[in-house]
Every structure is written in structure tokens, then in C-alpha cells.
Image (cartoon, rainbow, N blue to C red):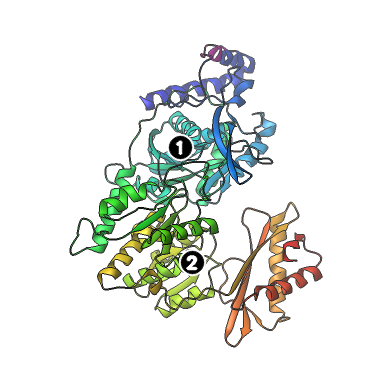
Amino acid sequence: EQTRKAEDLTKMTSTCTSMLKCNPSGALQATRSRCSAAPTSAKQHTRSSKFLSSRSSALCPFQAKPQVVSICTPSGGRHRRKQVQVAASSSEAVSSAPEDHEKVIKQYKRLQNGSDVRGVALEGVEGEPVTLSPETAYFVACGFAEWLKKKVNSKSPRVSIGRDPRLSGEATRDAIIAGLVSRGCVAEDIGLATTPACFMSCVSKGFEYDGSIMITASHLPWNRNGMKYFTASGGLKKPDIADIVATAADLSQTGPPVELSAEAPKTDYMPEYAAHLRDIIIKGINHPDHPEKPLTGLHVVVDAGNGSGGFFPSMVLEPLGADTSGSQFLDPDGNFPNHIPNPENQQAMDMATEAVLQNNADLGIVFDTDVDRSAVVDSSGTAINSNRLICLLSAIVLNDHPGTTIVTDSVTSDGVADFIAARGGKHLRFKRGYQNIITKGVELNADGEETHLMIETSGHGAIKANYFLDDGAYLAVKILISLMKARLEGGGSLSSLMDGYEDAADNAEYRLTLTVDEFQSEGARVLQGFKELVDSKVHTDWTMAESNYEGWRVSVDEGDGNRGWVLMRQSLHDPLIVVNIESSQPDGCADIKQKLLSWLEYSTNYNVDYSKLM
């Protein structure tokens, strides 16, 4: 039925387009006649995905009613609730006149965030106009549909759609379903889900969708949203997203969305995904006394940050015998009222640590909004994220795969490299961006170099045995297995697995704004100048690192065998030069920072605001 309706819509759209080309006024009259018959009580966002764009007023006087959602905003230490609208179309929307086509292309291009799509989906934050309206989401979904049909060589590919609890999630979902069906896809709504689950829906036996879309903006604020895309081959890459948004921009110029009833069936996939995780735990622990409940006697506190991770205690841990009392913020709430759902966020880690200590738990697990990242807290209250998490997972993976290569991002501590080397592993410090490190790991394996772990300091971590998928729940499962096996073998803690690693005494990050429109070329000039500074040996204690894949990383001799480092790199998408500094000495970053500041003050020909170094 979906396919038949899509074919009817395609024929109708083609006819209207031809009429516009041959007789614009006649086509306009015909379109108005169709719209005048539309029931004025229709709503823009219904479960049946009836979707009309406010931008269509030039061709259709029928105006969709915007969805109203309720948000919490902090006020005087308390949260107050107010209502905002989901805009029917982007605040930056332009007409479909040919002379505006370049502007439209730029607007859609700005939605690309590396290997996914992100934008402002809700009004309510000053200075942040809506850029990802339901209309825009509709056309991006059309772009994905066209890409997917070519990818899987099918006229009607099956697509699963999941979402996190963001306030704009349902309206965005309805628009995406409408867009997919309009291009011939068969859409299925899997409801509240996680990003890794969306991928797994493409490979799980009995589901095996041709593609999947996760509606999420990770840990970003409540007014943002976005989309991540998958096929059975994994997450889409940057060139794929560029193709999709370019197609979306082109399709948006053929005319606005028309009224469309494209009811998508609901499929409850999360129980299947949870069963997959439970099976991994059962097999991994192989408990001699409790084979079906191998977590018996283990007390685990989960902090889901009101995101999509609330399923983990009840659907994964408790059925296996774990005590999950003290778990917090499990209810999905797109206001994210308790803390930012982000394992890098200090408040999130502090609140999880407090919960572990108050409940005398054996382990705490912290998820980000869409559960593709995680961090843990051990029984002593030690937060294990960032470099510590990399070391913990490196120890686990090296125990299973001695000598393996481990790929990390460019800002990992020197202590991480030392830790991996001391355990017989090989460390490759690559680039920022989880898709960059995952792609590198896939390439290394293809070239015959065993690479079982690819992980960022942000908590994005992928393991070869798990489809090279960055899955925060899977990482938590691997840690649970190691902890339980250590207990069965007579002791040991998570912290003991990280013996030999020490955090740097001081670290800092500075984001310097490039002050010209052509910021990419200006950033390259700044980086070249920095390299020339290091090569000049003005600072004899500075030595360029042997391998640099992103910017320039410099080792700093701090005396008595101690060392620090400074990395200067350029943001791919923003007009920023990012400076990361680490020192083995308390307050040691200040000396390195001062040398950078003196160089920039002396080199007055760079268009960069370095005031944050002052």
C-alpha cells in the first residue's frame, strides 16, 4: 500500500513539475484547486505523517499548524516550564526561485556535521534560528531514500526509524517517514531507540532493514536535533552525507511537500537488541553456578541522563541477576533536566560517582543521550572516562588479542601510549572524529594489521568483533564481563586493570577564533607558522612528534625525564584553531601557553583571536 501511494505521489509530482515548466499559471491554479479541497482541520504532525509545509504558501494557501512542545528552562536554580513551537519550516527558508538555488544548497550543506546531520529544530534560544524544520527533515529523508535505493539496488528499500526523547523527535520522525514513503521506501517506526540499536536492526536476523535512521543530536541542548544513518555495512561516511544533503537541496526546489498520509507500522525492536546484549554477557562470563543469571551478586547503578539508555537496567542487567537499585534518570525526558547526558561532562560523572558511593555499588555506568558512548565509575568512586576509559578497554582487548593495534584520536595523553606499549600493544594516534578512527581501524584490518579497538577520548569506542560499531552499551557489557570474571577468579577491580597509568598533572584546551570568512586557508597559514616556530628551535625543549595526522603535536621536555605536549589543530567545520596542552607538572600548562601567546603577539599578520590565551 505504501509503495502504491508513493508511486501515485511520484506521478502527481512529475505532472505538476511538467505543468510548471510549460504553463506556470495553469499549474499554479491546479495546485491551488487541490489545496482548497484539503480539510482545514488537518494538523501538520500526526501519527499518520500528514505533512504540509508552511513554506508551501506560495503554491498552496493551506497552512499547517505548528506543533507546540513544553520545555524546562533554568531560572533561579529551579526549572520553569514554557511552551515553544516546532516551526513548520526553517527560519532560514527561502523561496524556490532559481536565483535562490545556491542559497538553498548552502543552507543544506550547513546541516552536515561530518558523518551525520544536525541543526536547530526548535525555537526558543536567542540567536539560534531553526535550521532543521520538519520540512527540511522531509527533504533530507528524500535525499537518503534516493541514496539508499542506489546503494541496495531496490526501488522500495525497507528503513527503520528510531529516535531519542528529544522534544522535536516525533515531529521530525513524522516528516522523515513522509519523505521516505514519497520516494518509494517502506518505513517502519521502531520508536524510542539507541543509535547502535538502529544499526543492529540492519543486521539482526528477522529484521535486516536495508537502512536505518536514528533521530538524535547526541548530547547537544534540547533545541537541537539531527539524523544518523546506517546500512548493514555500517554508518554512512562524509561523502555519503554530502550526497544526501545535495540531493535534498535539489529536491526542495521542485516544490514543497504535499499532503501525504503514510502511516508507518510500529516495530518493537529494542527487546531484540537487549536480548543480543544479554547473550553476549552470558557467553562472556560463562558463570559456573549461575549460567543464566551470571550477574548475580553484582550491584550496578546506571545513569541514563534521561536519554535513551533507560532500558539497560530493566532489560539487560536485572534479567541476568544484577541489583540495579540506585539507578537514576532512567525516564526519557527531552528537557534533560538533571544533567547533560554526556560522559565527558563533569557534573554527569560527579552525580554518577555520588550514586555509586551512596548505594555501595560495584559499578556505575553513564550513557550519553543516544547510547553510542559510555563511561563507568568503579566501586571506590573513581570516574573512568576519557584517557582512563581508553586504558581500561585497551587492557581488556589486549588480554583477548595480545599485540593488537589500538587507534585513538589525536588528543590522547602520552600516558595512554606508554600504557598500551607496556602491555605489548601498538598505539596509533590518529585524528579527532569517531568515524575517522573507525575508518582507519577498518583500513588497517583490511591491510592485514590486526586492530581490535578504535576509541576516542569522547567515549566513542568501536570493537572489531562488534561490527566496528561505536556502541556505549556494548562497551559497558565488555567491562561488566571483565569485572565479573575477575571476581570469579578471586578478586581484582577495574582500577587494577589500569595499573601503571597516571593522569597528567595539568591539562588545558583553548579554542581560538579565526576572524576571516576564508577561515580554512587562514587556519592552514596559522598551522604552517606554528610548524615553522617549532622547526626554528627557538624553544629548544620543543620537538615535533614523529607522526602527525591532524595539525602539529609537539613534545615538551619538562626536565628529569618528564614531558608534556601541545597540539595545535584546525576544526574541520568551524572557524577555530584548537590548542590542547598537557603537562607532567602542576600548573605546567601555563608556561607552554605563554610561549604560544608570545609567538602570536609577535606574529601580528595572523587573523586569529588569541585573547583566550591571555
Q: Measuring from the top left, give residue 469's x and y in whole percent.
A: 40, 55
Q: Is residue 180 visible?
A: yes
Q: Earlier in the sequence, mark 1 or mark 2?
A: 1
Q: Reply above or below: 611 against 71.
A: below
Q: Reply above or below: 463 against 174.
A: below
Front-most of residues 284 and 350: 350
Give the residue displayed 57% in from the left and 13% down from the top: 30
Give the residue displayed 68% in from the left and 55% down from the top: 575
Q: How many marks?
A: 2
The residue singled out by tag 2 in the image is 408
The residue singled out by tag 1 in the image is 145
The magenta span reads: 33-40
Residue at the extreme bottom of the image, as rendered = 560
Q: In whole angstroms, how far apart are the C-alphas of marks 1 and 2? A: 33 Å
Secondary structure, mark 2, is strand
Front-most of residues 259 and 120: 120
Q: Measuring from the top left, give residue 89's x and y in whole percent.
A: 60, 30
Residue 38 painted magenta: yes
Q: Is residue 375 left or right of residue 21?
A: left
* Amino acid found under the numbered disc labelled 2: Thr
